[in-house]
Amino acid sequence: MTELSESHDDPFAPHLAALVVLDDRGVVVGWNRRAQELLGHPDTAVIGRPAFEVLVDPPDLPAVTEAAAKCRRAGGWFGVLTLRHRDGQLVELGLRAHELSRGERGREWFLAGAPAGDVLEWQRDRAVLDGLYRQCPIGLVIHGPDQRILRVNRAIERFSGVPAADFRGLSTGRLLLADDARKAVDRVHQVMQTGRPLVYSEQFVRLEQDPARERVALVSSFRMEDPSGRVLGVAEMIEDITERHRAQRRLALLDQVGSRIGTTLDVAETARELAEVMVPHLADHASVDLLQAVTRGEEPTRAVAGPVVRLGTCSVGAQQPGPPHPEGHPVEFGPDTPQAGCLAEGRPVLEPVLPPDWVSAAGRQGAQAPDLGAHSLIVVPLAARGLVLGVMTLWRSRRPDAFETDDLTLAQELASRAAVAIDNARRFTQQQQTAFTLQSSLLPRTVPDQSAVEVALRYLPASAGPGLGGDWFDVIPLSGARVALVVGDVVGRGIHAAATMGRLRTAVHTLASLDLEPDEVLSRLDDLVDLLAAEHEAVGERPVGEQVVGATCLYAVYDPVSGRCSVARAGHPPPVVTAPDGQVALLDLPAGPPLGLGGLPFETRDIELAEGSLLSLYTNGIIGERHIDADAGLTKLCAALARPAGALERTCQAVIDALVPSRPSDDVVLLIARTRMLPPANVASWRLPSEPASAGRARALTSAKLTEWGLEHLAFTTELIASELVTNVYRYAGGPATLRLIREQCLVCEVSDTSHTSPHLRHARTTDEGGRGLFLVAQMTERWGTRYTREGKTVWTEQPLTGTPV
């Protein structure tokens, strides 16, 4: 019984069923062995006897009688009846009765019976099998050993649109496109040969009769065998997952947009990323066109249809032509093109099917249409924060299916996300350009003309960092033919750093005009940085995780008359000195605290520099990234500067090439100054005692020296200047005076004394006997001023060599 049950064979088959033949009166005339096994009666005990008498229990007689009546009326019957076993037990049997005509001999009834459990199980199996072929929503395809289709169910008929009968006898994959058919044949052949089932294998099932419609199926295959192991074929369960596949593809695209687009704050790179994401997942060709204002970082004007710049393109296949106009080139859209309408109105355009003459149709695309054989088009605006930044155009040419409404919805979502990244990049570009403009306006455009040093410099803004740095430099002419060399670096990046740099640079110029010592200049700058920090804290302008305001600075003053250089630094890297013979050394100079710490002293160090020495000032960017050992960077810098004397510009560029990457992450400043010495013949100095006759002595010495220099035309004014300044020393300072004349780009007249009292320019009253000296000096000179030293002060004047200023 177990074998019969598990075999699921027809329980009414002749070799399995109990077979009984009754005559028209209900007498048993035939009885097989299986009937004896099920009911216990041998054939000799039942043949010739009425079946009602032998097999039916009296309580069940009404049901049996009713079944017999139905059988007589219909000529046959099927159902379950309860019969009596020989030992008295009741047995439920499924019975199937058929009328047999015996001609003149009348009628007989052929009964086939089987245990009711086997019959019910067989019925369920038949119902399942019938459901698979008629009602199951999952497709079923039965392949024979020769890989020809034996049968398909109605789900395959609905899925393919081909009647189920038309499949019978076709070879595997016969109705599919070549690529899809080959995969189907290989799959069936593999399962047939190996016997290993394939579960949930995705397969494109594009039909030859409808190639434009893309379908995706989930296929599970297994080999069919009979009880003896003979291969009967392969059965495949096929589920249509086209919509699920599209949904997964859309989700994957959305995920790619989040991970691949906006990786940089570069407008052009973001546009290229968007085009590359679209192909081939959604389109065969894609282009991204942005308004020219957006590429410059500017905010676009509303409802503007152009001009645009093509910044992103992508096409499937190496041999496939891309959209016209290479990246970076301007594009003009005709007034009736979908792109122009999309830009002006901010509405998407879907053209599911393009007419054959669409490319050449006047007023549609004109010269801007790509020669791609495109048959379907989508144009969506790139809009963010209420502004249209550009358009994205998608074409399909290789893929046969047309764009649908769902594709348009997906394209809009992708474009919306990408537009935010593009607008962020645009705003960053705008901020960068603003900062660059601010920084370039704050930095010196040219090196001022002076005779103390020859200067070569390089300033390279960071190209990989988040905003501009606050590095700055300066070359400031000072009195007495001296020059101040300044390099500084403000903490932080961006506009705040650039603005702070500008304020510090202005302060340095002001302090330099006072001719203060380097350590005093840094002390005054330190006070200014403290003041700026207090202002920022008061209004809450403190970047997260950063110092409010801070900076480093190096200030050096070089005197070409004495060859002495005075240097002080505030937390800045030390300068490098290269002797004329190529010997290189870092200047041993106290580091000093960075500006902004407050309350700590700075120290000036004086060094003697031979004529032709190189004094190199720089910022952190030139000695390496923050994670690189500073000592290693300084060693490389010294090695790059240890070269024989040559053209200063070549030396400067060689250092940049050796130490600075192509895309530095920090601003780079390098200032190299080659020292010069004024010829002794161009300097004259005299020490005059503190007595009334010194003024006359000063006039005589001045007149003689100017005559020697060929500057007789300046003798009168210079004698008067020297006389007045020496007289002031005698009257107000006491002690001896030193008169010095310097001939360089201008004529310098200096008078030094041991007093720290500052002279003041004032307007004398008509009744005053004095007080007009400095007023006259100011009128006859181009510039004048006072500088202080540890020994006293020096009042200096400058006159152009061409004559006395009016």
Image (cartoon, rainbow, N blue to C red):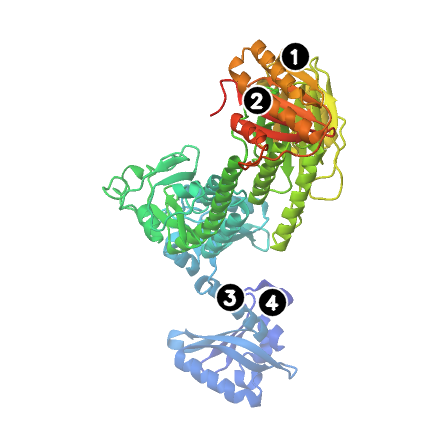
Q: x, y percentage for residue 652?
A: 60, 21
Q: Earlier in the sequence, mark 1 or mark 3?
A: 3
Q: Which type of secondary structure does the marked residue at label 2 adopt? A: helix
Q: Nearer the viewer, mark 1 or mark 3?
A: 1
Q: Is residue 220 above or below residue 107?
A: above
> Residue shown at 39%/82% (left/top)?
73
The circle drawn on residue 680 is 1
Q: Earlier in the sequence, mark 3 or mark 2?
A: 3
Q: CA gap, disc 4 to disc 3?
A: 16 Å
The circle drawn on residue 720 is 2
Dot 1, crowdedness within 10 Å: few (<14), some or many (≥20)? few
Tell me, yes or no, if residue 289 can be seen here: no
> Residue shown at 65%/30% (left/top)?
787
The circle drawn on residue 487 is none
Residue at mark 3? 128
Q: CA gap, disc 3 to disc 2?
A: 126 Å
Closest to the observer, 443 or 666 = 443
Q: Nearer the viewer, mark 2 or mark 4?
A: 2
Q: Are marks 4 and 1 in contact (CB under 8 Å)?
A: no
